[in-house]
């Protein structure tokens, strides 16, 4: 019922979210020189997202630029190589742009709330169809260690509504090493034909204030044959199980 309701209402608003966020990026680029800017360039062995690959299991390069205001709002955009298992289709996408905007505010000394909106823009089709879409999310953060997040896309990849639930935990072991883990549940049966759990466990080495190396294990819980019910235009990404992910990031 929850998924069906999302399909019927609000789709047009969030389908245009990517364009609105992209225009907002112009404001970011025109912002004051002394603003609180952050940038990152990453090299990843795979583009893993909610238990599936957006790069067919191949390495990618990603970049991100964002601005965080003292008042708590933030704005930015990320750019990544992308490649789904859809190269039998014409005009397949090779680049994903992800503009975003949001707000954070304290609830107490230890707790912080966050609301955000994201756009996903592609330079081509995904599994034979235009797939730009928008998503909204709400999150709670406890200190710098525990976070919970719910993300809703009324028309993910311009196909079906999805709801994603994520819980993540981080703990500093030493001054330059951090352990982290994540658990998610993707309510996407109408999109991929499955609702599934996914998780990760790994560590990050901060070699200096600008360079980070991260190694983690990712896995997906799936039952049955994922390929059942294949037909043209169906969104069927490469779901990952027993997978190691390596990333190297340089930032400021």
Image: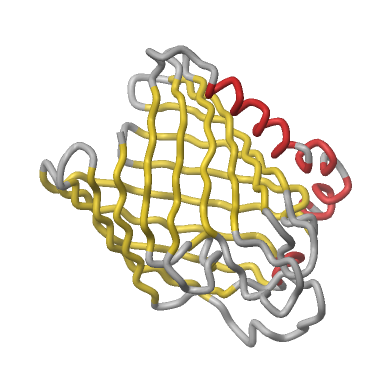
* Residue 238 picture quarter: bottom right
* Residue 147 picture quarter: top left
Residue nearest the viewer, comparing 118 with 6: 118
Q: Which residue lies at the image location 11% right of the left edge and 41% below the top edge?
A: 175
Asked if residue 208 is positioned above or below residue 50 in the image, the reply reads above
| In the image, farthest residue toward the right | 8
Count of numbered circles on the image:
0
Q: Position of residue 164 (x, y in %)?
A: 60, 53
* Residue 232 picture quarter: bottom right
Q: The C terminus appears in which quarter of the rendering?
A: top left
Tell me, what colour scheme is on the image?
secondary structure
Q: Is residue 179 left or right of residue 115?
A: left
Asked if residue 70 is positioned above or below residue 148 in the image, the reply reads above
Residue nearest the viewer, comparing 187 with 209: 209
Q: Position of residue 67 (x, y in %)?
A: 46, 25
Asked if residue 41 is positioned above or below residue 3 in the image, the reply reads above
Q: Is residue 159 left or right of residue 58?
A: right
Q: Which residue lies at the image location 82% right of the left edge and 39% below the top edge?
A: 10
Asked if residue 42 is positioned above or below residue 28 in the image, the reply reads below
Q: Which residue lies at the image location 45% right of the left edge and 51% below the top edge?
A: 62
Q: Which residue lies at the image location 41% right of the left edge and 16% below the top edge?
A: 35
Q: Position of residue 132 (x, y in %)?
A: 73, 50
Q: Position of residue 85 (x, y in %)?
A: 62, 75
Q: The N terminus appears in which quarter of the rendering?
A: bottom right
């Amino acid at each position: 019922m929850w998924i069906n309701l999302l399909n019927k209402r609000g789709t047009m608003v969030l389908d245009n979210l990517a364009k609105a966020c992209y225009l907002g990026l112009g404001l970011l680029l025109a912002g004051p020189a002394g603003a609180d800017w952050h940038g990152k360039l990453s090299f990843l062995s795979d583009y893993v997202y909610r238990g599936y690959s957006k790069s067919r299991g191949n390495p990618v390069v990603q970049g991100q630029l964002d601005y965080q205001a003292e008042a708590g709002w933030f704005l930015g955009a990320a750019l990544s190589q992308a490649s789904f298992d859809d190269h039998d289709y014409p005009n397949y996408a090779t680049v994903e742009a992800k503009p975003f905007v949001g707000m954070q505010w304290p609830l107490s000394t230890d707790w912080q709330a966050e609301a955000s909106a994201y756009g996903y823009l592609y330079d081509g089709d995904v599994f034979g169809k235009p797939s730009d879409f928008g998503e909204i999310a709400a999150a709670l953060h406890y200190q710098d260690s525990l976070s919970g997040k719910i993300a809703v896309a009324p028309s993910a990849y311009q196909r079906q509504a999805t709801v994603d639930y994520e819980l993540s935990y981080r703990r500093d072991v030493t001054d330059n090493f951090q352990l982290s883990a994540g658990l998610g549940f993707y309510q996407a049966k109408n999109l991929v034909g499955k609702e599934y759990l996914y998780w990760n466990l790994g560590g990050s080495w901060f070699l200096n204030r600008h360079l980070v190396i991260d190694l983690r294990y990712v896995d997906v819980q799936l039952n049955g044959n994922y390929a059942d019910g294949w037909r043209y235009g169906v969104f069927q990404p490469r779901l990952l199980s027993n997978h190691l992910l390596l990333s190297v990031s340089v930032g400021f």
